[in-house]
Image (cartoon, coloured by chain):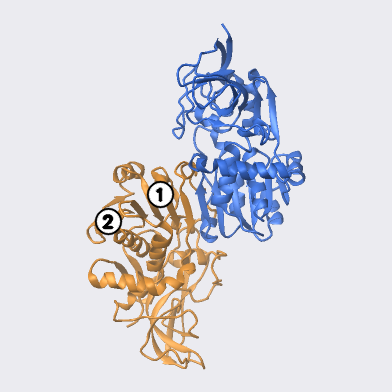
Chain colours: A orange, B blue
Amino acid sequence: MKPNARITFQRVPQGLPVVEDFGADVAEVPTAGEGQFLSKTLYLSLDPYYRNVMKGSQIYADRLRAGDVMVGETVAKVIESRHPQFQPGDFVAVRNGWQEYALSDGQGVRKVDANLAPVSTALGVLGMPGLTGYAGTVFLAQPLPGQTFVVSAATGPVGSTAGQVARHMGARVVGIAGSDDKCEFAVRELGFDACINYKREDLASALKEACPRGIDAYFDNVGGSTLEAVLGRLALGARIVLCGMIGAYSMDQMPHGPWLGPVVGARATMKGLVVYDHMDKMAEMTRVLSGWIAAGSFRYREDISEGLASAPEAFCRLMRGENFGKALVRVGA
Amino acid sequence: MKPNARITFQRVPQGLPVVEDFGADVAEVPTAGEGQFLSKTLYLSLDPYYRNVMKGSQIYADRLRAGDVMVGETVAKVIESRHPQFQPGDFVAVRNGWQEYALSDGQGVRKVDANLAPVSTALGVLGMPGLTGYAGTVFLAQPLPGQTFVVSAATGPVGSTAGQVARHMGARVVGIAGSDDKCEFAVRELGFDACINYKREDLASALKEACPRGIDAYFDNVGGSTLEAVLGRLALGARIVLCGMIGAYSMDQMPHGPWLGPVVGARATMKGLVVYDHMDKMAEMTRVLSGWIAAGSFRYREDISEGLASAPEAFCRLMRGENFGKALVRVGA
């Protein structure tokens, strides 16, 4: 038997997840049937929304029972195929979950072009997080040249994409992040005009200083008190893209939201963003961002853990905000 | 001396306003100077936003000090004029405030056509409240035929206009109001498909029953727990117009808002509405609504208090939600 190491869902976390919420086992590597292919996982993507899946939130298709393999996006290499559109050697973005090998019928699988950029980016800036940041900025937030664009979780794959896209659209970009290192990265590497360390500075005062003419567009990845502080500085006609509320994913009772009076005063628009609505823009996003990557005007950072066994702890770190860049697990080579 | 009775601002209310927050005095009726006209107040409009003006909210131009005449919209009759565009006998919508007579330089004054409808409607469905309901529904909420449109404070001038405009646009209209009488009025007179008495029914369950396919558009006049309940029933792509938050006007600390997760899940859009942005649509709104009024397909209700001295108590009733229809004070004839 050829072993297939797997990480399983064990139980619904209480608050922030801990490694004991996960299990591990070893199964046999399966064989591709007619219309299937077998792929070997290279990188596993760690994403905050898994925390919502783990509590059975109704907005996701996946339902996990104890012992099920954890769901998740991966980049994998096809090693055996009885599917006409996939050949051994192909790189694919596929939902293999937290395991070394998996079968697929090709549904929802994207081929990954290894010539554009390292294949791991298909899980980050050239994948769903990148599409989230791209579509939310280009189609919803719509910053105009000279306008002030603010983004939270600024060095993550969504936030760094949103901010750099806004910069390429001519906006003044202000990031919000959780450490001086992240802020320095946002300004020096990502080209943001400013970045606020919300853990060290008073966010309301810092936003006032960094956004003297108010905030025209805000890409919200966190919700909570950060969103509330931003609402206090809205410019007339501001657009707010509601994308993630990581702080709430680990809560059982949903928290209150911000006082919405400023939305009325600013004649602002708040829009909910779910990336699946924008899948038709994946090719466009990949073309645009990979062009900027090649030209050196778009950067990204990855936070890679080594080995599938490190995935639970790496996910817990992500949920505590301790990652720096797109959280990935290197599962195989 | 010809006496001009006036109601004055006395102090910032603590919570819900009480009559002791107002004062009264008698001044001399002034004389029109060059470029001015003098008008006699016929109706004073009572509007919840006055409560915000009384606490010095920064979104209004008016600043009140103790002893100042209370600000407010009125319908008045020109009785003396040295202004080329206004003649004695003209009816005007003018911000005379809470007093029997006032001067105006014509700035921001609208002439009122007494042939279209009773002149009092220039403060209600054919005035700023009507424009609020009209513009918010036609340009922001944009209900489509067959969609479900929900409006709170459904029998007030804003809500009854919004709901009836949505009905004329082909939507299914569900009102939310605070008494069985109001709900009966909404269904029988305003032609709403249903109306929920939020004081008697559990709003979340009642909305589920009244809106089996979800809520496509919501015109929010109240904020608070009503808004939160509506968010729990949003249809995909829902539009929410944030217009008034009457419950909060009487609070010193702004309350929290609703949990915004459903806005993301529904890919909804929330838009802040300030009627002053839509003044250019006043003529269009007046033409459309007065046509419907003449045809009998648009109705309204007024809640008229007799005499200027009754204004403070009538305003306090309005802020307690005890009015039924557009709150007006008959000041003169």
Q: Out of A244 and B128, give the one closest to the viewer.
A: B128
Q: How many residues crowd mark 2 within 10 Å: few (<14), some (14–19), many (20+)?
A: many
Whether residue A75 is visible: yes
Q: Position of residue B285 (x, y in %)?
A: 59, 43
Q: Tell me the residue that label 1 is attached to.
A: A226
Q: Out of A325 and B252, give the one closest to the viewer.
A: B252
> How far apart are the alpha carbons under marks 2 and 1?
18 Å
Mark 1: amino acid = Thr
Q: Residue at x 67, y 20 (%)?
A: B333
Considering the numbered disc 2 on the image, is that residue within a helix, a strand or a loop?
loop
Q: Quadrant of residue B322?
A: top right
Mark 2: amino acid = Phe
Q: Residue furthest top?
A: B1
Q: Out of A106 and B43, give the one closest to the viewer.
A: B43
Q: Tell me the residue that label 2 is attached to.
A: A192
Q: Out of B53 and B17, give the one closest to the viewer.
A: B53
